[in-house]
Every structure is written in structure tokens, then in C-alpha cells.
Image (cartoon, grey):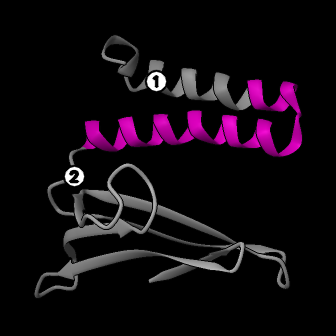
Amino acid sequence: MFLCAMNNETNQILLAVTLDEHKVPAQIHWKADDGPNAGTLQEVKAFLLSLYDGNGGDTLKIDLWTKEMQIHEMDRMIYFTLKGLSETYLKATNNKELATDIRRFGDYFAEKTQLNKSV
């Protein structure tokens, strides 16, 4: 569970992972206090979580997906993640050139995985 404090208000983000007998994710659910589906537990097939450790100067990450996640679904997830990273990077740094390069790599990824035919 993650707690986000904004303006002395605490919001929670919950990630719940059900493991099978081999400790492989069988189900993943999440919910958040804010957003369009606030407070509603939703099932997902995967999540990517990156946290920046300012003290260590490194990124901590958890990447999990269920057994049912198909390769074409992972391709779509990675494509949209790259697209989102380019937008986040632009907002955070205003570095249009590098944000464009990230987006272009996303487009290249879509082409190589043949997503450009379905996205």
C-alpha cells in the first residue's frame, strides 16, 4: 500500500497481488482514493512501478504480470508506457528534444512489434 500526502491530506494506493502455488502472480488488483474509479478495486494483468530513491540516487522498481498476460498485451503496455514517459519527461524537464527522442523510440518499438497496425 502506498500513501500520498498532499496538502495535509493522505490518499492511498493499494496494490494486491495473489500468487499461485509457485509464487507466480495469478491476479493483480489495485485501487486508489482519487481518480475516475476512486475506491473501486480493479483487476489488471500487469503493473510497472518505479520509485526514485533520492538518497541512493537510484530507481527501485517492481514489474509484475500475471500468467495470462500475452506477449501482444505486453507490447502494447510497453508502447504506452514509453509514450507516457515521453510526456512525463517533457512536463518535468521541458526538454522537448529528448522527449521527442523517447516518443520516436516508442514509435520504433511499435513498428518492430507491429503495433502500428493496431494502435
Residue located 66% across and 22% down the image: 104
Secondary structure at badge 1 equals: helix
**Mark 2 Cα shell of 10 Å, populated few (<14), some (14-19), many (≥20):** few
Q: Is residue 68 left or right of residue 12?
A: left
What is the x, y in percent for residue 59?
Answer: 70, 71
Identify the residue position indicated by label 1 in the image. 110
What is the x, y in percent for residue 75?
Answer: 37, 37
Residue located 52% across and 65% down the image: 49
Examine the rendered structure and indicate whether residue 52 appears above or below residue 45. Answer: below
In the picture, which quadrant includes the N terminus? Answer: bottom left
Q: Is residue 8 left or right of residue 4?
A: right
Residue placed most toward the observer, 13 or 43: 13
Identify the image quadrant of residue 24: bottom left
In the picture, which quadrant includes the C terminus? Answer: top left
Residue located 68% across and 35% down the image: 86
Identify the residue position indicated by label 2 in the image. 69
Badge 1 amino acid: Ala
What is the x, y in percent for residue 3?
Answer: 55, 81
Residue located 34% across and 44% down the image: 74
How far apart marks 1 and 2 lie (CA) works out to 18 Å
Secondary structure at badge 2 equals: loop
Examine the rendered structure and indicate whether residue 23 appears above or below residue 45. Answer: below
Identify the image quadrant of residue 72: top left
Examine the rendered structure and indicate whether residue 110 appears above or below residue 59. Answer: above
The stretch in magenta equals: 71-100
Identify the disc placed on residue 14: none
What is the x, y in percent for residue 25?
Answer: 23, 74
